[in-house]
Amino acid sequence: MDLDAVTKLVSGEGWGLLQSLPPYDESASLSLGEGLRLAGFDADLIAAALTQSRLRAKGHEKFGEFADGMLFTADGLEQATRLEIAARHAQRFRGAGIEQVFDLGCGIGADAMAIAGLDLQVTAIDADEVTATLAGVNLRHWPGASAFIGTAEGTQLPSGEGARHTGAWLDPARRTPGVTDARGKTRRVFKLDAISPTWSMVQSIAQSLPATGAKLSPSFPHGAIPAGTEAQWTSLAGEVLECAIWWGPLVSHVGRSALVIGSQGRSWTVRESDAEGAGGAAPVASSLSQIGAWLYEPDRAVIRAGLTGALTSVVDGFELDSGVGYVTSDRCVDVGYARRFAVDESMPLNVKALRAWLRERGVGRVTIKKRGVVLDADELRRQLRLSGSVEMTLVLTRVKNQQVCLVVRPA
């Protein structure tokens, strides 16, 4: 979307057209567009309105009914913070007594909306003219919120007494402007020194404004966590979406933590203090003989945060191998941030032996879960050549650096 299209959409005619469109239906979009052309609407305006209708429908997943009054770009929607998580970011600032927040790299304004919704003053800034304009449209309901074109580096932030109740929120760009992949999406960058603003700039802002938070990639390296901060990995419905770094009064607990938000909105927080050993290290099984009656699979945010040790502590168990995340125990415990399976069998991973074992039990279909092994699940299914009525779940992983197979049942 370009600035001309945005201008057309926010005009009286454009906004009226956009708001009058029926719920988006891909199969009906061509006929709808033709009808609008026959009604005398400009072709460029029709294209922009239909694009927004499609993006709004997709935006419901992140913003619910709020999406019906917002404007998006495809990249902006994909990168925007989900409403549930943005609300938690905003609450950090409010809980710390912050009154004004500079949202540096605001995107389409998702976090700025959540912060403004708690009656805090928000100055939203983005380097892209179209994106900053869309953020301004999305923030129109809050008098204390405004959006401008600019950069984190070029923004004059308050200092001294003026910084006392002021905070900063940064969502550094992790994509290369103008460079797209085969699907037409802006290409991601994965190195910490390739984000914009730079990681050193983010830390510099945190030094001048102690109440600073930054949204970073879930792959953020543990070794880069600044001293005295909180690094929190957050997942929603099983998908790890971010690692947020918090400074100063925004820190709840220094060190690594994992926030697990379930599909029904219930949440669990796991911290380093919950884990056994320095840095949340988990005890590791030494052989297959230590496989217990139960297998636990922690949420990926817990694994990303390196806090599997918290789960081993709760269930009094062992991680199957360092880094794989799976935990075994003879104790049956309900853990909100982990799935539990009953273990029916455990064996070294040998295709011929596994095929014979499954055939003896009439297994014709398997669900394959794997972690810590390099193996093609579809190729394994072909090699097993199963034909029966029973269905089982196989967990392929490691114990003591050896590939193993566990036959499990959800419990």
Image (tube, rainbow, N blue to C red):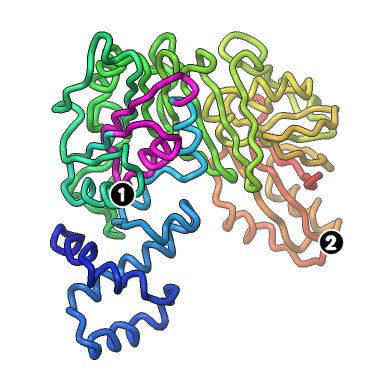
Residue 165's quadrant in the figure? top left
Whole-Å distance between the Cαs marked 1 and 2? 63 Å
Q: Quadrant of the N terminus?
A: bottom left
Residue 102, horizontal then vertical, whole percent: 29, 29
Q: How busy is the neighbourhood of tag 1: few (under 14 within 10 Å), some, or many (20 plus)? A: some
Nearer to us in this view, 217 or 99: 99
Mark 2 Cα-neighbour bin, 10 Å: few <14, some 14–19, many ≥20? some
Residue 235 placement, left or right of 141: right
**Closer to us: mark 1 or mark 2?**
1
Q: What kind of residue is marked 2?
A: Gly
The residue singled out by tag 1 in the image is 140
Task: From this view, report whether residue 197 is shown above or below residue 250.
Answer: below
147 with respect to 18 (left or right): left
Q: Please give the name of the residue rendered at 60% of the width and 20% of the height, measured from the top-left corner.
A: 271
Q: What residue span does the magenta drawing correspond to?
A: 94-122
**At 85% across and 32% down in the image, what residue appears?**
332
> Circle 1 — which element?
loop
Q: Is residue 354 magenta?
A: no
Taking depth in this image into account, of 277 and 50 the one nearest to the observer is: 50
- The residue at which mark 2 appears reads as 362
Instruction: Identify the residue at horizontal 25%, vertical 9% (top origin).
Output: 160
Residue 129 visible to an observer of this rendering: yes
* Helix, strand or loop status at disc 2: loop
In which image quadrant can residue 301 be found? Answer: top right
Q: Quadrant of the C terminus?
A: top right
Which amino acid does the dot numbered 1 rest on?
Arg
Contact between labelled residues 2 and 1, with CB atoms less than 8 Å apart: no
Which residue is more in the foreground, 371 or 173?
173
Horizontal relation, residue 177 to residue 226: left or right: left
